[in-house]
Amino acid sequence: MAGAVVEARPRTASVRRLLRRRAPAAPTAPRVADVRALAVRRDRVQALRHVDLAVSPGETVALMGRNGAGKSTLLGALVGLVEPAAGSVRVGDAVPHRTAPRELVRRVGLVPQEPRDLLYADTVAAECRAADRDADAEPGTCRTLLSTLLPGVCDDTHPRDLSEGQRLTLALAVVLTARPPLLLLDEPTRGLDYAAKARLVGLLRELAAEGHAIVLATHDVELAAELAHRVVLLADGEVIADGPTAEVVVSSPSFAPQVAKILAPQHWLTVTQVRKALASAEAVSSAETVDSARAVDSAESAESAKSPESAS
């Protein structure tokens, strides 16, 4: 055995030298979710047909389309609630509809259209304890997460007594307790006021920055403009567009935010983007003004040096 190990060492070294000499292969981007040629039937309705979707860590994808386009069905397939009629769905190394729920929660979590559908306990504290058990997390994990996301909610509060935004945040904390790499949200801004929506946007940005992949089904074009790296448009169960947010929404007036409609053909989607563009333009203009002033000063200095009075 010792001789075999000694003999293997020079071989290993030779392989390493060979690998160093070879041009490195292009790295394959990891995928949190991979959907290929997915078809779903519900009764006699073809809900999805030949849908392809790939989602990478840290990416936020907005699913958009009219009611009945297949957005919620696609989310259901990703979380294992819907079984494919054809094609394949993988979340990490798991096939969702064939994976036990206690294993699946560590890979993907869904916040449904109605957060109350995910909440069944009588108190916030009980919801958090159940979430810890379901995720095999340390006791107090969900409560700590909720306190970070939404300070000031009492343990004995009934979830039905929370506001829409608070219920959404509680449901989000329940789902995130298992730290799933893929987070799904179905119409997350329904019933939210402006302040609650702004908090949600900030939270989802932080999660994406931490590496979570986020897929959200939404009619809220402003939310998609603020958050999404990509927009996937669905119609009658088919993907009709999939690309960078600015390109897709600007080319589709029905799904373009107001800023894009007003300032087309510029690919500005939000007020924040417009402000940054104006600030950048002002900075460039100021820099050009300074450069021009310096050029004038230099020219005047050169002229003064050449004048007879300066020579004498």
Image (cartoon, rainbow, N blue to C red):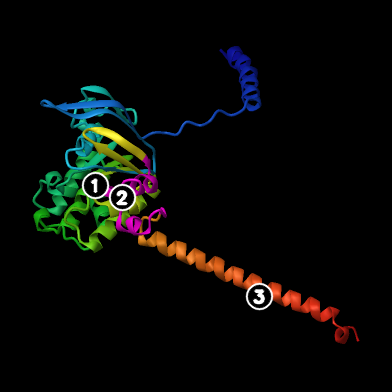
Up the image or down, 234 lies above or below 270; here it is above
> Which residue is label 2 attached to?
224
Residue 296 at x, y percent in the picture: 70, 75
Can residue 138 be seen?
Answer: no
| Magenta span contains residue 256 | yes
In the rendered structure, the answer to whether residue 92 lies left or right of residue 18 reads left
Q: Earlier in the sequence, mark 3 or mark 1?
A: 1
For the residue marked with disc 2, what is the amino acid?
A: Ala
Q: Are marks 2 and 1 in contact (CB under 8 Å)?
A: yes
Q: Earlier in the sequence, mark 2 or mark 3?
A: 2
Q: Which mark is residue 293?
A: 3
Residue nearest the observer in this picture, 96 or 258? 258
The residue at the point 38 percent across, 55 percent down is 264
Q: Quadrant of the C terminus?
A: bottom right
Q: Which residues are magenta?
A: 243-267
Up the image or down, 1 lies above or below 222; here it is above
Report the Cα–Cα distance between label 3 and label 1. 51 Å
Residue nearest the observer in this picture, 136 or 232? 232
For the residue marked with disc 1, what is the amino acid?
A: Thr
**Which secondary structure, mark 3?**
helix
